[in-house]
Image (cartoon, rainbow, N blue to C red):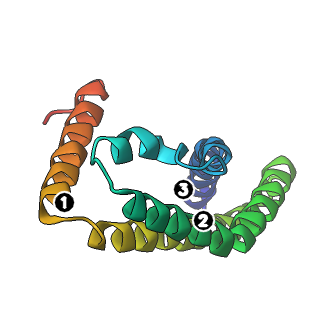
Amino acid sequence: MQFTRKFATWTAVAALGVAGLFAAETTQANRPWHGHGRGQFMSQLNLTDAQKTQAKSIFQDARQSSQPVRQQLMETRKSLRAAVKANDTAQIQQLSTVMGSEMGQLTAIRSSASAKVYQTLTPEQKQKADELAQARRARHQAAKPGVNN
């Protein structure tokens, strides 16, 4: 029983930490072309005006469709904070699961939008996008202290 209580507490702490990161991320995502460094990434692909317009529309649609999920996530986060303060381990576990599902929905929406934009790229732009993504992953891994690559 003690292990279950500790696990639930650590799950809640981790969920709150991820939620804090997500809150900062959604603030940036509300500014066109600035969420996740997308602006710099997109500018390096030398998109045509038509591609830029299409990408902007795709990402705006994704933001609109994710709005209800983001709102629900904020409510879940509030409930989770209350459960932590009340030391309600069952509620913490349940809300952490809900929160994970909501974050998964947001990831699916964003990934679908990115996939749609990727399909509009020329073969050269796709190659450049893949190279940029690989370089970004390498920088991210190099920045992690104590991680063996």
Tell me the residue at 38%/63% (across/down). Answer: 51
Q: Quadrant of the C terminus?
A: top left
Q: Residues within 10 Å of mark 1 (few under 14, many from 20)?
A: some
Are the residues at dot 2 and dot 3 in contact (C-beta closer than 8 Å)?
A: no
Q: Which circle's residue, 2 or 3, is located before the other in the chain? A: 3
Based on the displayed image, in which of its 4 quarters is residue 4 positioned? bottom right
Mark 2 vs mark 3: give the one in front: 2
Tag 2: amino acid: Gln
Circle 3 is placed at which residue position? 3
Q: CA distance from mark 1 to mark 2?
A: 21 Å
Query: What separation in Å lies between label 3 and label 1 (alpha carbons)?
Result: 48 Å
Q: In the image shown, does 32 or 21 lie closer to the viewer? A: 32
Q: Is residue 110 visible?
A: no
Which mark is first along the chain, 1 or 3? 3
Q: Which mark is residue 60?
A: 2
Camera-nearest residue between 92 and 43: 43
Task: Say which residue appears at 48% left-offset and 63% top-offset.
Answer: 53
Left or right side of 144 for 64: right
* Amino acid type shown at disc 3: Phe
Circles 3, 1 touching at the beta carbon (< 8 Å):
no
Q: CA distance from mark 2 to mark 3?
A: 44 Å
Most foreground residue, 86 or 121: 121
